[in-house]
Structure formats: C-alpha cells, structure tokens
Amino acid sequence: MKPVTPRGFRDIMPEEALKRERITRAVSDVLAVHGYLPVETPLLEDRRSLERASSVDDTPFQLFDADGRLLMVRSDLTMPIARLAATRLEHAAAPFRLRYAAPIVREQAQFMGRSRQFTQLGAELIGDAGASADIEVVSLAAEALDAAGVSKWRIACGSVRPMKELLDACGLKEDDRAAVLGCIHGSDFVDLDELVQTLEVSEDARRALCGLARVCGGAEAIEQVRELLAPCGVDTSCVDELEKLFAAARALRFGDRLVIDFSIMNSFDYYTGLVFSIYADGVFFPLGSGGRYDDAFSRLGEKDMPAAGFALSLEQIEEALAYAPQQRPLRIAVPKGSLFNDTVDALGKAGFDVEALRNPGRKLVVHAEGVDYVIVRPTDAPAFVASGGADCGICGRDSLIEANLDLVQMADLGYGRCRFVVAEPRTAKGKAQARYASHGSIRVTTKYPRITQAYYDRIGQQVDIVTLHGNIELGPMVGMADRIVDITATGTTLRENDLVVVDDVIECSARFFASPVGLRCDERVRQLADALAASRKVCS
C-alpha cells in the first residue's frame, strides 16, 4: 500500500505554494505598514491554560508529555497570542499590535471531505478598549482582503453585548439563560422561539429575545436593535460602537461591504462585544472572523486587558481567488419520501413554481424559474446544504440533530409531525431497570444515536447504544437490547410488535434551514424563509 497523508491533511505542491506565499506576503505587508509586529507561538499549548480563557472543543490532537501535562495542538492562534502577551509583555507599554501567519488543526465531521489543517493570517490589537480599536481591526481586515486580491467580499457584524444585557434585564435563571445562549450559538432559531415562549418574561422581552438574533440589514438595523431593547429597560448605548463602525466604514469607502447581522452572535463565553465574519462570492465557508475578547486575560489569571482581532483563512482566500463569477438559480434541497408532497405544497404556497417538481420522474435535479430543486434523502439534506450542494433545504428536525453540522434552522414548517419515544417489550417490564441496577447502564437499539445519547444524558443514565439502520424493534425482541429509541407517528408498528412506550424523547417536524454563508450572502434564502413562515401562518 502506498503511503498517503492522514485524513484531512494534504501536501501542497510548488505552484500552489507560490500562490499561498504571495497571498501571505500581501496580507502581512498590510499589517506591517500599520505597525503590527510578527510573533510565533508553539505548535503545542498546555490545554489547562487555554481552558481558563475560553471553552476548548474536544480534539484528538492532544497528548501527554513526559511531565504528565496534557498538551494540545493549537486549534486557533488568538488564545496563544493572548497567553504570549499576558506572560511575555506584562511589563511593556500597551497597546500591542501583533500579527501572525501559521498553521492550526481542527477536528471536522468525519466523512464530510473537509480539511483538518488550515493556515491563519491574523492580527491582534491588545490593550485598546475604544471603538477606534474595533474600527481599526475591521478596516485592517478589509484592507488585507483587497491586498490579497479578493474582489467581492462582505463583512457581517454584530455584537454579543445587547443579548447579554437583555438577558441581565430579564433576570433569567442560570439554566434558562444558558439554554437561550445555546440556541443562538447553535443557530437554532426554531428552538429559540419555542424556548422563549416558556420563560416567565414580559411580551416585550419575548419579542426582543426572539427578534434580536434575526436583525439584519444596513445601518438602519442598529435602530431596530434599539427598538427591541428599549422597552425591556436595556441601555441602548450598547450598540453605539456598531454605529461608529458603520460611520467609519462609510468614510473609508467600504460601507457598502458592511452589513449588520446579529445571527452571527456566538461563543458568548469568549466574545465581549463586537463579533464579525467575512464572506465572499462563491466560497461556501467564511474567509475569516474576529471580534472583541476583553475577558480572556483575566481568565488567564493576569491583569485585565482589552483586546480585539481577526484571523483570515488562507485556504478560503484561495477559494475566493479561484471562483469564476456566475449567476445561478437558488438551489433548494427537497426531501424525498413522506415529506415530499407537503414540501412541494409549502414551496408552492411560498410563491415558487413547483409544477415540474410535482412529478419529477427519475430526475434528481428539477429546474424551474429561478430555482433548482435538488431531490435528496431527508437524512442527506443537511450534508448537501453544509457542503455547498444546495443553498438551503427542508428536512425533519431529527435529521438536523443527527447530522450535527453548522446550519441555521430558520423555520418550523408544521408538517411531518412525529415524536421520538423510548419503548420496551410489554413482557419485559422492569428488565431495563434491573439491568441498570446491576450493570449501571441500559442497552438501547436505535437509528438515531445522537438523539438517544442526548436523552440519556439529560436524565442522567449511562446508555450503551447499538446503532441499526432498520427494524429497530428487533433489538429487545431478540435479546440485543433492553429498549429502543425510535420515531413514531401513530404507534402502529410498536403495537404490532408488542412494544409499549416508556417515555417521550422529543417531538419533531419539518424545518427549513440554510448554510451560514447561504443565509448571509444570498438574500433569496432569507426571503424564502419569510415566505414559508408567512404562508404557514395564513394556513393556520
């Protein structure tokens, strides 16, 4: 067998390496002109140190050294730079302007064809808390993109401050607060709406909690944020810095490339104010991101020090430079099977031409005016959208949970309703509890391991999951398992196999979702989401 590189890692040959060198030099030259000095940090960092500053994702790229310390290969450069500044520059006069160009590694979803090594080109401005620092960081990113040769880029800006201050004003319990932030961080606006309806807050607060993450537009969107916050008693000066940023962008002549988009709010335990992401035509992942992270230094156990910065992806810049502009229809992933007819009806009510879609025959892609319908298995719809095969799509909530990909859930369409349940043989009552008492775990067969694991985590029981692709009911019938977790609409299959429901897990229905880039770079996606939601309200 010929030696090959590990999954997600690749060799770079001279022709591409020269292109990457030119891009890196162009970005570095821009940063150098503005006084940013180069630094390098180790490939390995002490995991415990990084965890003090922000949450660290689980990664296989870690090891114990001879001293017994758990080390990890860096998955980002901002925190190592913060550690460097806190420990090596503690007696120097701030602010510090630092730049870098170095590789990182990140674990990716398996079998999605994604790289696990990236090169970041970035800058950190440490020790300046003013709005001028935010302006400097964003304008530097804009100048670097131009220098690299990227033509049609845009920067989506938001801030975590308004949401944090709104939650403070609502006085939510810590669990409720965490749940709200979890929905926003996970871009699940459907669950956010449902959660907010259960909270003991005013109608104004409900409107603000649901609406803030959906605010999008130009400078006028800042006023929309103020209108949501003011009735809740929140000081609306928390968006003044965004207003100053917009004014500066206009003065620097990139105001038409800047948009307000509060759906990009994320990592609330890390960011403290401004947060932004960078997109370009034809590139299905962000070119970069950045923001303000003022709390990182105190969490490292050092003195408080404000900081803001950004990182560009060299690989995504390469993609942007290779893209040939083209006009193409909106591409929608349409689920075959039980959701198909209702999906066709929903798209028709939203104003789309679905005549050819009603009887597609063996066609996998159906063309209509302004739209291509890509007909896929419901379980594959998330992968098609996440990987650029479609701009948006429709599938059941369960498929989105199991796929566990970076997608924005925008609307509950109300059809395809079903529920997930825990069930066991009628004749085996008490067997599962007895096994748990003796072994400390329950064995479960299912097609839905993520949903199952989340349920047992929630109730605090250890579970041994046996994943099957069909005939889940056979598990306990032939002694493979104690119980099943499966989907049911009428309960007929359970009754026919003499299985009884022990507990409910979750309810599911069809949802409209999009990729983050599709949502933020193609207005047609947001328009379709609004049309689907509006047509559902009319029908109900």
Image (tube, rainbow, N blue to C red):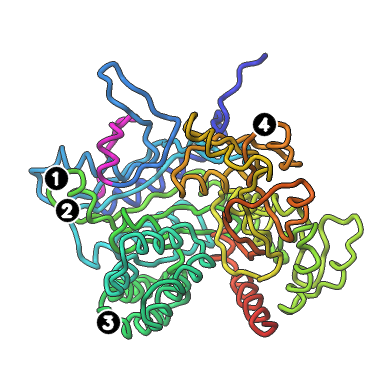
- Does residue 102 sit above or below 206 in this rendering? above
Q: Nearer the viewer, mark 1 or mark 3?
A: 3
Residue assigned mark 3? 233
Residue 535 part of the magenta-drawn span: no
Residue lying furthest left:
91
Lower sequence index among marks 4 and 3: 3
- Which badge, 1 or 3, is on the more N-terminal residue? 3
Q: Residue 23, position in %: x, y?
A: 46, 45
Residue at mark 4? 480
Say which label, 4 or 2, has the lower sequence index: 2
Q: Amino acid at mark 1?
A: Glu
Callout 3: SS: loop
Q: Check if mark 2's residue and mark 1's residue have beta carbons within 8 Å.
A: yes
The N terminus, quarter of image: top right
Gap in Å between the C-alphas at discs 4 and 3? 57 Å
User: At 41% across and 64% down in the image, what residue appears?
Assistant: 180
Residue 353 visible in this rendered orientation of the protein: yes
**Mark 1 touches mark 3? (CB < 8 Å):** no
Q: Residue 251 in the image: x percent, y percent?
A: 34, 74
Q: Which residue bears the numbered disc 1?
A: 302
**Mark 2, mark 1: which one is toward the viewer?**
1
Q: Is residue 142 visible?
A: no
Q: Secondary structure at mark 4?
A: loop
Amino acid bearing label 3: Gly
Magenta stretch: give its range: 36-53
Do callouts 4 and 2 mark residues in contact (Cβ within 8 Å)? no
Spot the residue most to the top: 1
Amino acid carrying mark 4 in the image: Met
The residue carrying mark 2 is 305
**Of marks 1 and 4, the one in the foreground:** 4
State left or right for residue 374 relative to residue 320: right
